[in-house]
Image: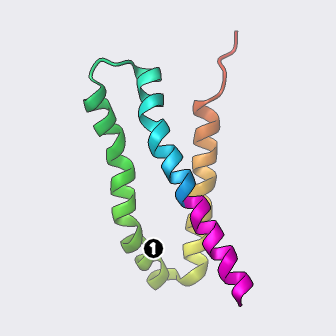
């Protein structure tokens, strides 16, 4: 049991580390890609979607769990993850020359 607890703690520390790195890199990447002009407005607009998703996730998860059980919850999570992967691949693709 102690071994499992250590894995959980290590995973939580790793997730916290990645969140911290992401919070440091986000403004740098936004400024590099979109420029300094209107940086505050752009940064605020870019933060709206993740904030809304974090706020809605518990309610949506509870609704899915209540309506379809664990399979619906896992299926929806898998479908959203695959959709995000496809969208990321589409957005980051290199244009043909």
Q: Position of residue 84 (x, y in %)?
A: 57, 48
Q: Tell me if mark 1 has few (under 14), some (14-19) or many (20+) residues whose alpha carbon lies within 10 angstroms of its own.
A: some
Vertical placement of 91 versus 86: above or below? above
Q: Nearer the viewer, residue 79 or 1?
A: 1
Q: Nearer the viewer, residue 10 or 49?
A: 10
| Left or right of 87 in this view: 25 | left
Q: Nearer the viewer, residue 66 or 39?
A: 39
Residue lying farthest bottom? 1
Q: Residue at x 45, y 84 (%)?
A: 66
Vertical placement of 30 versus 86: above or below? above
Residue lying farthest right? 3
Q: Position of residue 55 (x, y in %)?
A: 33, 63
For the stretch drawn in magenta, what is the main secondary structure?
Answer: helix
Vertical placement of 32 versus 58: above or below? above
Residue 8 forms part of the magenta stretch: yes
Q: Residue at x 63, y 75 (%)?
A: 8
Q: Which residues are magenta?
A: 1-15
Q: Which residue is mark 1?
A: 61
Q: Residue at x 48, y 29 (%)?
A: 29
The kind of secondary structure element at disc 1 is helix
Quadrant the C terminus occupies: top right
Q: Residue at x 35, y 65 (%)?
A: 56
Vertical placement of 51 versus 90: above or below? below
Quadrant the N terminus occupies: bottom right
Q: Position of residue 94 (x, y in %)?
A: 66, 21
Residue 76 forms part of the magenta stretch: no
Q: Which colour scheme appears in the figure?
A: rainbow
Asked which quadrant contains residue 35, the reply is top left
Asked which quadrant contains residue 11, the reply is bottom right
């Amino acid at each position: 049991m102690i071994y499992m607890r250590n894995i959980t703690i290590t995973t939580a520390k790793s997730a916290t580390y990645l969140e911290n790195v992401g919070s440091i890199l986000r403004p740098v990447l936004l400024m590099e890609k979109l420029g300094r002009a209107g940086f505050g407005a752009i940064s605020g607009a870019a933060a709206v979607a993740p904030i809304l998703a974090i706020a809605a996730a518990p309610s949506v998860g509870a609704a899915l769990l209540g309506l379809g059980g664990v399979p619906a919850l896992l299926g929806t999570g898998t479908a959203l993850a695959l959709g995000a992967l496809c969208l990321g691949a589409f957005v980051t693709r290199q244009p043909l020359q």
